[in-house]
Amino acid sequence: MKRVKTILAVLVITTGIFTVQSCSSDNEETTGTNDLFITFTLNGEEIDIRGDARVASAFSGVNLSINGNNNLPLTDPNYIRIALLIPDKNVEPGTYPFSGDVLTSGLYHCRILVKRSTIQSLNSGNLVITSNTNKTIDGTFSGSATIGNETYAVTNGSFRAISDQ
């Protein structure tokens, strides 16, 4: 019994030490993961994607992909997924045109999966980076693309995501 109490005491002390050491002392403010969002209007329908479980950043070298979906099953005809592709996670605030050319690297893209069809990239419109500080990127976007005979208009887009690992 004494051995069990000793082991428990060591575990409690060790946990306390690691908890105290994990606190940041540099006072750097970072965005909480529940503050992440992607919102936009798609052909008049408002889409609001919020929270760390639904807005995720993926990194490949310096490339940044901000991804989100409306949390419906993939088989649901109303399922929507969006990806904002940024060729450099250290992008400065400014306006960047979307490119429909998905084969050339270094370009900005907005990919959307809607009605089980993927819009490879909006072929008009812009991504506007308003801030990229403290590992958080904010901005707006809009544009349009055509699949077959149907045009998809994206307006009032805005986002906040993690911009660095």
Image (spheres, rainbow, N blue to C red):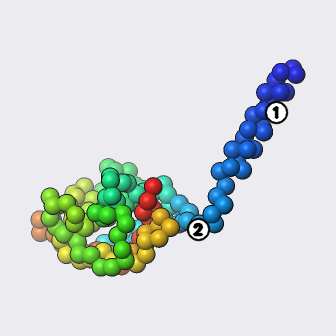
Left or right side of 117 for 41: right
Quadrant where the N terminus is found in the figure = top right
Residue depicted at x 48% and y 54%: 53
Q: Quadrant of residue 11?
A: top right
Q: Position of residue 14 (x, y in %)?
A: 73, 38
Quadrant where the C terminus is found in the figure = bottom left
Q: Which mark is residue 9?
A: 1
The answer to which of marks 2 and 1 sits earlier in the sequence is 1
Q: Quadrant of residue 105?
A: bottom left
Does any portion of residue 17 appear in the rendered image? yes
Residue depicted at x 23% and y 72%: 98
The span from disc 2 to disc 1 (Cα, nearest Å) is 34 Å
Amino acid beneath label 2: Glu
Left or right side of 11 for 137: left
Residue depicted at x 15% and y 61%: 104
Q: Position of residue 141 (x, y in %)?
A: 32, 75
Q: Nearer the viewer, residue 28 or 143?
A: 28
Q: Which mark is residue 147?
A: none
Q: Residues within 10 Å of mark 1 (few under 14, many from 20)?
A: few
Amino acid beneath label 1: Ala
Residue depicted at x 66% and y 61%: 25
Q: Residues within 10 Å of mark 2 (few under 14, many from 20)?
A: few
Q: Which mark is residue 29?
A: 2
